Image (spheres, helix red, strand yellow):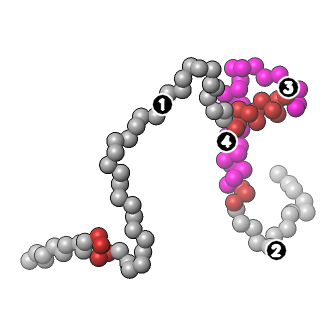
Amino acid sequence: MTRPRKSRPPAKAARAKGAPKTPAPSRRPTRKPSRARKSGRTPPSNPLDDFVQAAARVLALPIEPQWRAAIKANLDVNLRLAAFVAEFPLPDEAEPAPIFTA
């Protein structure tokens, strides 16, 4: 024996009283993003590119152009791993180990 399928209530009845209405989707066609013109405008720079360049300048470290992508990728991985460590909660009672052994 099969049960009759229940229909869902209309959207208006499902919304709680006093809840804000969601805006209706726009019916205008979306525009394609415009390409950067060749009028001398430079594309927006990546913060990691700026950081690698600034760090190399401060350290007086010459970096060959072909290594910049690898340096940026390595720095990106290190920053993501550091975010995992930084978000780990430690209890207030936690203290550093007095002796470190390998």
Please state the extent of the stretch shown in magenta in the rendering. Answer: 58-84
10 Å crowding of disc 2: few (<14), some (14-19), many (20+): few
- Drawn side of residue 18 relative to residue 81, left or right: left
Q: In terms of sequence position, does the residue under pointer 4 or pointer 1 come before the other?
A: 1
First of labels 2, 4 by sequence position: 4
Q: Position of residue 92 (x, y in %)?
A: 80, 73
Q: Secondary structure at mark 4?
A: helix
Q: Can you name the residue that lies furthest to the bottom here? A: 17
Q: Looking at the rendering, which quadrant does residue 24 occupy?
A: bottom left
Amino acid type assigned to the residue bearing label 3 in the image: Leu
* SS type, badge 3: loop
Tell us which disc is closer to us: 4 or 3: 3
Toward which corner of the image does residue 73 lie, by quadrant?
Answer: top right
Q: Secondary structure at mark 1?
A: loop
**Which tag, 2 or 1, sits closer to the chain's start?**
1
Closer to viewer: mark 1 or mark 3: 1
Tag 3 residue: 61
Can you see residue 73? no
Q: Quadrant of the N terminus?
A: bottom left
The residue beneath circle 4 is 77
Disc number at residue 93? Answer: 2
Residue picked out by circle 1: 34
- Compute the Cα span from label 4 to label 3: 21 Å
Mark 2 or mark 1: which is in front? 1
Q: Residue at x 24, y 74 (%)?
A: 9
Query: Could you tell which of marks 2 and 3 lies nearer the N-terminus?
Result: 3
Residue 101 vertical placement versus 29 (above, below): below
Residue shown at 13% from the left, 77% from the top: 3
Q: Secondary structure at mark 2?
A: loop
